[in-house]
């Protein structure tokens, strides 16, 4: 039997291999550390932290079986405020460190907390390879479209023309779309949510944590000091109905008052666009399929994200498919080697066939 032929691992209800659930009923208090939370007043990080602290007891895991790894940035203070294992690591390298943990410790629920700068600038290489390898981890990408920790420079997700301390005449960069990037890297679970929508945020976290493989959740998060109001269109009651394009698996992609707007496929280009349902007919509206093996339609939906004057953005789970994980396959190769060669010979492995002894 080869590693690629290995059967699906025996999972506990939390998605981990051979890990017994916590016997005691846990509450948010058990997952809240004694450290003073230090973010700017009004920061969206507070909302996400509260949601995560309230959600973790649902995993049914002991705290020693959960680890949060962060990089550098405002969001990367996250591990301090959770009473689990955690590591405040180095700039952009959280996915690499988390990869090592996931491969060597199948008993851990591994989480990465990162920001748009940490993940998509210096950490871009590590992020895309974690996604394509399908490492068993959950990545929370806080996107406030600005560098907050270093006091207001533009980030890889800042819109073109953004005036900041480092772009006084406006940014000339084309911004990353984190969801499009993740889908292009063949991520098996990709979602987007908003910091202020506690119910939706928690629902997405629940699905992401249950997914075996890499889950990436982009969280629109407000920075009240350096980029206040960046996502107001998706939060204000007067605009959110026309701005948020909700994604629900198996349902037509409609939004706006009374569902008057819908996402349809352009017959000429094959691309997706927003149209008045009354003009095109209800049957023309695309039905969202998050479980489709081909990510093309999910990618096309992600391109509907608009950071212009009239802001619109799909919110929800874009893709949720199953694929063998890198860490399961790697452990399978080790098991195969041990079963065919006993315990193995580490010295022989290190020496290989390309070394020789000089007398």
Image (cartoon, rainbow, N blue to C red):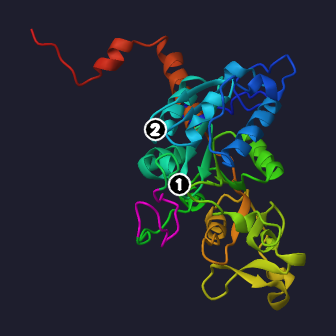
Q: Which residue is mark 1?
A: 185
In the image: residue 114, left or right of residue 290: left
Nearest to N terminus: mark 1 or mark 2: 2
Q: Toward which corner of the image does residue 278 lie, by quadrant? A: bottom right
Q: Circle 1: is it few (<14), some (14-19), or many (20+) Cα within 10 Å?
A: some
Which residue sits at x=49%, y=65%?
A: 175
Residue 317 numbered tag: none
Which residue sits at x=65%, y=53%?
A: 221
Where residue 43 sits: x, y (%)? Answer: 66, 48
Tell me the element at label 2.
loop
Q: Nearer the viewer, mark 1 or mark 2?
A: 2
Pick the front one: 298 or 165: 165
Q: Is residue 341 magenta?
A: no
Residue placed farthest to the top in the image? 359
Dominant secondary structure, magenta: loop
In the image: residue 58, left or right of residue 80: right
Residue 93 numbered tag: 2
Which residue sits at x=59%, y=42%?
A: 75
Q: Is residue 76 above or below residue 170?
A: above
In the image: residue 243, left or right of residue 329: right
Residue placed farthest to the right in the image? 258
Q: Which quadrant of the figure contains the C terminus?
A: top left
Which residue sits at x=80%, y=49%?
A: 198
Where residue 185 sits: x, y (%)? Answer: 53, 54
Residue placed farthest to the bottom in the image? 279
| Chain part drawn in magenta | 153-168
Q: Is residue 340 above or below residue 41?
A: above
Q: Toward which corner of the image does residue 34 lie, by quadrant? A: top right
Tell me the element at label 1.
loop
Confirm whether residue 60 shows in the render: no
């Amino acid at each position: 039997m080869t590693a690629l032929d290995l059967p699906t691992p025996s999972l506990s209800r939390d998605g981990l291999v051979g890990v017994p659930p916590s016997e005691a009923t846990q509450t948010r208090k058990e997952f809240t550390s004694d450290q003073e939370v230090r973010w700017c007043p009004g920061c969206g990080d507070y909302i996400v932290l509260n949601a995560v602290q309230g959600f973790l007891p649902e995993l049914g895991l002991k705290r020693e079986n959960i680890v949060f790894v962060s990089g550098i940035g405002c969001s990367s203070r996250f591990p301090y405020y959770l009473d689990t294992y955690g590591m405040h690591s180095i700039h952009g390298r959280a996915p690499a460190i988390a990869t090592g943990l996931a491969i060597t410790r199948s008993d851990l629920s591994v989480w990465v907390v990162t920001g748009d700068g940490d993940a998509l600038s210096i950490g871009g290489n590590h992020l895309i390879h974690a996604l394509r390898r399908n490492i068993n981890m959950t990545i929370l990408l806080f996107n406030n479209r600005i560098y907050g920790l270093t006091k207001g420079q533009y980030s890889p997700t800042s819109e073109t023309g953004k005036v900041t301390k480092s772009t006084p005449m406006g940014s000339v960069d084309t911004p990353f779309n984190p969801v499009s990037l993740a889908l292009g890297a063949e991520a098996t679970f990709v979602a987007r949510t908003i910091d202020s929508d506690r119910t939706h945020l928690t629902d997405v976290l629940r699905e992401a944590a249950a997914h075996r493989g890499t889950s990436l959740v982009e969280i629109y998060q407000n920075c009240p000091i350096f980029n206040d109001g960046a996502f107001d269109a998706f939060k204000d009651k007067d605009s959110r109905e026309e701005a948020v394009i909700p994604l629900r698996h198996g349902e037509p992609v409609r939004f706006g008052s009374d569902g008057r707007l819908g996402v349809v496929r352009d017959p000429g280009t094959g691309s997706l666009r927003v149209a008045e349902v009354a003009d095109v007919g209800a049957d023309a509206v695309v039905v969202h399929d998050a479980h489709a093996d081909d990510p093309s339609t999910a990618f096309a939906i992600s391109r509907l994200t608009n950071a212009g004057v009239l802001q619109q953005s799909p919110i929800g789970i874009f893709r949720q498919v199953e694929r063998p994980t890198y860490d399961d396959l790697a452990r399978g190769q080790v098991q195969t080697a041990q079963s065919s060669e006993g315990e193995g010979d580490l010295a022989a492995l290190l020496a290989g066939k390309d070394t020789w002894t000089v007398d």
